[in-house]
Structure formats: structure tokens, C-alpha cells
Image: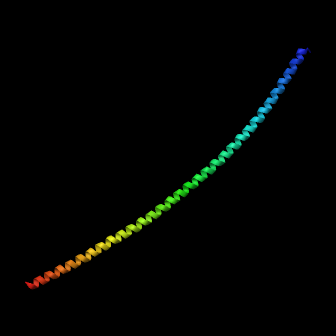
């Protein structure tokens, strides 16, 4: 072969070697980047899952607290309404007794007036 043919073969071998090295390097880097990306995605997924559980727990705690407050408020209102109803009934009974007494006095005074005539 001619010296030019030898140079051409050497250049072809050199280009193939560089191409092979670059391909191996790119494949290795790609694998490492993919591994890093997968790790980051796993960590993020775990943190999101934890945040979601924390939010869910906070939500349930808040709902239970509101439910408890509501039950307390209902019990208080029930107690107050029963007391108010008793108060009204007591007042009605007092007025009824008073009316019965006034009626009795009126009847007695009518009888007395009739006897005086």
C-alpha cells in the first residue's frame, strides 16, 4: 500500500476508536443521568406521598375537631332550649294559677253581691 492508503486506514481506525469511546462515554453518562433522574423521581414521589399523608391527617384532624365543636354546640343549644321551654311552661303555669285565683275571687265576690241584694 501507499503511504496515503496507510494514513487513510489509520485515520479510519482513529475515527472508529474515537467514535467508539464517545459512544461508550455517552451511554455511560446517559445511564448515570437516568439513574440520577430515577433517584430524584423516587425521592420526590416519597416526599409528595409523605406530604399527602400529612395533609390527609391534618384534614381528618380538623374535620374531627369541627365535628366535636359542632356536637358541643348542639348539646349546648339543646340544653338552653330545654331550659327556655321549662321557663315558658313555668310562666304559663304561674299565669294559669293566677287566672284561676282571680276567677275564684270574682265568683266569690259575685256570690257575696248576690247575697247582699
Instruction: Kindly identify the residue that appears in the image at 77 percent across and 32 percent down.
Output: 26
Instruction: Kindly identify the residue that appears in the image at 80 percent across and 32 percent down.
Output: 24
Q: Is residue 10 above or below residue 38?
A: above
Asked where in the image residue 25 lies, by quadrant, the reply is top right
- Farthest left residue? 117
Instruction: Kindly identify the residue that appears in the image at 44 percent across and 66 percent down.
Output: 75
Asked where in the image residue 94 lies, by quadrant, the reply is bottom left
Q: Which is more toward the observer, 87 or 107?
A: 87
- Farthest bottom residue? 115
Position in image of residue 14 (x %, y %):
85, 24
Q: Is residue 84 left or right of residue 109?
A: right
Q: Is residue 41 left or right of residue 85?
A: right
Position in image of residue 116 (x %, y %):
9, 85
Position in image of residue 71 (x %, y %):
47, 63
Position in image of residue 65 (x %, y %):
52, 60
**Quarter of the figure with the N terminus:** top right
**Quarter of the figure with the C terminus:** bottom left
Q: Is residue 51 above or below residue 84?
A: above
Task: Describe the colour scheme in one phrase.
Answer: rainbow
Q: Is residue 33 above or below residue 83?
A: above
The total number of labels drawn is 0
Q: Is residue 87 left or right of residue 53?
A: left
Instruction: Kindly identify the residue that appears in the image at 87 percent across and 21 percent down.
Output: 10
Amino acid at each position: 500500500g501507499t503511504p496515503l492508503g496507510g494514513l487513510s486506514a489509520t485515520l479510519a481506525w482513529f475515527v472508529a476508536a474515537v467514535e467508539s469511546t464517545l459512544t461508550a462515554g455517552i451511554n455511560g453518562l446517559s445511564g448515570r443521568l437516568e439513574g440520577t433522574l430515577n433517584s430524584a423521581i423516587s425521592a420526590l414521589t416519597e416526599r409528595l406521598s409523605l406530604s399527602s399523608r400529612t395533609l390527609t391527617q391534618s384534614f381528618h384532624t380538623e374535620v374531627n375537631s369541627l365535628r366535636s365543636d359542632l356536637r358541643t354546640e348542639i348539646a349546648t343549644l339543646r340544653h338552653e332550649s330545654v331550659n327556655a321551654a321549662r321557663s315558658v311552661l313555668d310562666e304559663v303555669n304561674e299565669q294559669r294559677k293566677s287566672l284561676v285565683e282571680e276567677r275564684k275571687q270574682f265568683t266569690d265576690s259575685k256570690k257575696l253581691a248576690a247575697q247582699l241584694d
